[in-house]
Image (cartoon, grey):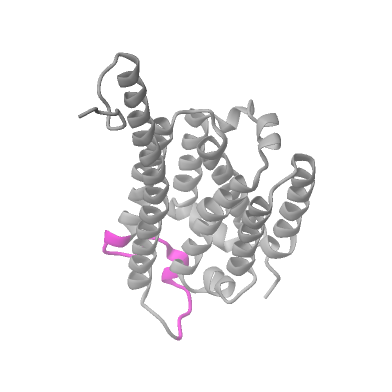
Amino acid sequence: MHPSAEAVALVPLVALAYAFAARAGRASRAQVAAAAAALALILAAFAGPLQPLAVHTFLWAHLLQNVVLAEWAPALLVLAVPPATAVRAAGFPLFRPFVALPLWLVAYYVWHLPWIYDVALRHPHSLLHLEHLTYLLAGICLWWPVVHGVYSNGAKALYLFAAFVLASPIGLMLALVQRPVYSFYTHAPRTWGPSPLTDQQIAGVTMAVEEAIVFFAAFALYLLRFLEDEQARGALEGLGDGRTTPWSRTDS
């Protein structure tokens, strides 16, 4: 089996690019740790036992690689960007919410179309690498407005909720459809493990649950921040017009 380009080329290139960005922007230890975690995730997905399973046998393994590249690793990489570097990239058109979210959705849906998915898997040294690179870049665009965007917490919560709702049909479809949709895995040689249909159902459920956890956790975080902002604003308005607030002092 040939070494995965994601492990031997993409990870070193991303690490090198981040080293320059971290040095120029004076990244904190937490930010460096986030970048290291992202690179470790990619290595684990493409340099370990998951790789041969994904490119030869099981859909669930390939979908797990996809969510690493499209959601988990990009989120960590965006969190790792120092504020000074983020400010310089603020005007980049692909980092705008109404561009980033559709771009990420198009990447997800197009690459999951059965005939495109199968063709990519049959060209593991060209199209499959392009698919994976697309996921990573689109994922970075998706998370940028959340982490570095100058938008309200309410707007960020709505953005994350939209991302979850609009992306979830892929996993649900794979979990609920009663026939295998990807011929590559239908005809893959199997000496162990689930049948093609069960494999697809496992992949769909895994994807749906993973997206629910990731996006709802982020959504809940920004929703709570939004509610705290509203509570603080209400308290300030109450102080301004002389109304009693929970922090007002009462004399007996």
Please state if 226 lies on the left or on the right of 130 as rendered: left
The magenta stretch spans residue 178 = yes
- Residue at the spot x=75%, y=43% of the render? 26
Image quadrant where residue 229 sits? top left
Which residue occupies the foreground of this view, 231 or 248? Answer: 248
Q: How many marks?
A: 0
* Percent x, y of residue 175: 31, 61
Extreme-left residue of the structure: 252
Look at the picture and state if 93 lies above or below 142. Answer: above
- The boundaries of the magenta stretch are 175-191
Please, what is the dominant secondary structure of the magenta stretch?
loop
* Percent x, y of residue 246: 27, 32
* Percent x, y of residue 242: 29, 16
Which residue occupies the foreground of this view, 152 or 138? Answer: 152
- Residue at the spot x=47%, y=45% of the render? 110
> The N terminus lies in which quarter of the figure?
bottom right
> The C terminus lies in which quarter of the figure?
top left
Which residue occupies the foreground of this view, 252 or 167? Answer: 252
Please state if 232 lies on the left or on the right of 51 as rendered: left
- Residue at the spot x=36%, y=22% of the render? 236
Image quadrant where residue 165 sits? top left
* Percent x, y of residue 84: 70, 35
Please state if 166 lies on the left or on the right of 41 as rendered: left
Which residue occupies the foreground of this view, 206 or 23? Answer: 23
- Residue at the spot x=39%, y=37% of the render? 157
Extreme-bottom residue of the structure: 191
Extreme-front residue of the structure: 252
